[in-house]
Image: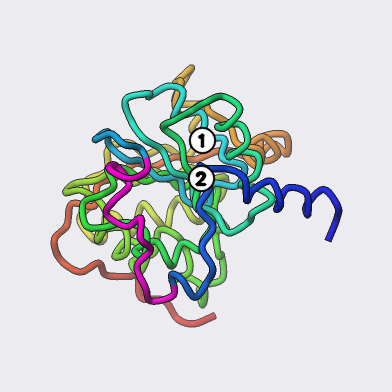
Amino acid sequence: MGKNKLKRFEENNTFPNLIQPRFEEVFRKDHSIKGNWNESFFKNDKPIVLELGCGKGEYTIGLSRQYPEKNFIGIDIKGARLWRGAKTAVEGSMDNVAFVRTRIENITSFFAKDEVSEIWITFPDPQLKRINALKRLTSSVFLGLYKTILKPNGLIHLKTDSQELHQYTKSLAELNELKVHHCTNDLYLTVKNDPILSIRTFYEQQFLDQGKTITYICFELSNEKPFIEHKYQRT
């Protein structure tokens, strides 16, 4: 492990806005912050917005600057990446920002029913093999997890360079009769100068430099029935 990474891990331990539980603390258990984000951490009653797989936290930071009336929490398993977002927030005295180091599968250990208003998913691993379909962060399995923590009709935003993941998510929303607010397979062709959608992550800029097209979809988890999945043959 490089010296810079070790130094970042050490500095992560000093950040008051970064929660890093041990695996055994949240595996099939609830973290003490669950249901207490507004009262214990942010000390306000503002809506909570999550960024899943946040990497360096560019969207978490960018959104928090534009919406001081909301609280933002970035979640990722990579501590070296989270260091950048947490450090930026500390240095900027941004009191509406937090980060959690954990796997997305553990999300219900950190958030209670109706505790979250919106979820952003920015450039996740598209898991293109059909055998990995349920690992996609917009699969029926993950939508079920999000449903347990989102307020009624809470929003899901997906921004990705993967046309396959975009189309999969769009068709899954249609299959489950979810209300789609916005959908485009070429974001910057159809949306100009949007202060929210134009926030660019480190990975997005890399994709743009490679000439890739960015997609976006926003939909509600408005269906009360269990989510159903596409029927795939295992390949």
Q: Label 2: which residue?
A: 122
Q: Amino acid at mark 2?
A: Thr
Task: Assign the N terminus to one quadrant of the image.
Answer: bottom right
Callout 1: SS: helix
Residue 104 at x, y percent in the picture: 46, 61
Point out the residue furthest to the top here: 193
Callout 2: SS: strand
Residue at x 34%, y 46% (from the top left corner)? 156
Q: Residues within 10 Å of mark 1 (few under 14, many from 20)?
A: many
Q: Label 1: which residue?
A: 59
Disc number lying in front (2 or 1): 1
In the foreground, 50 or 31: 31
Magenta: main secondary structure equals loop
Residue 7 at x, y percent in the picture: 78, 49
Q: Which residues are magenta?
A: 27-41
Residue 11 at x, y percent in the picture: 69, 46
Residue at x 82%, y 48% (from the top left corner)? 4
Q: Amino acid at mark 1?
A: Tyr
Residue at x 62%, y 45% (from the top left corner)? 14
Point out the residue furthest to the right here: 3
Is there a contact, CB below 8 Å, between mark 2 and mark 1? yes
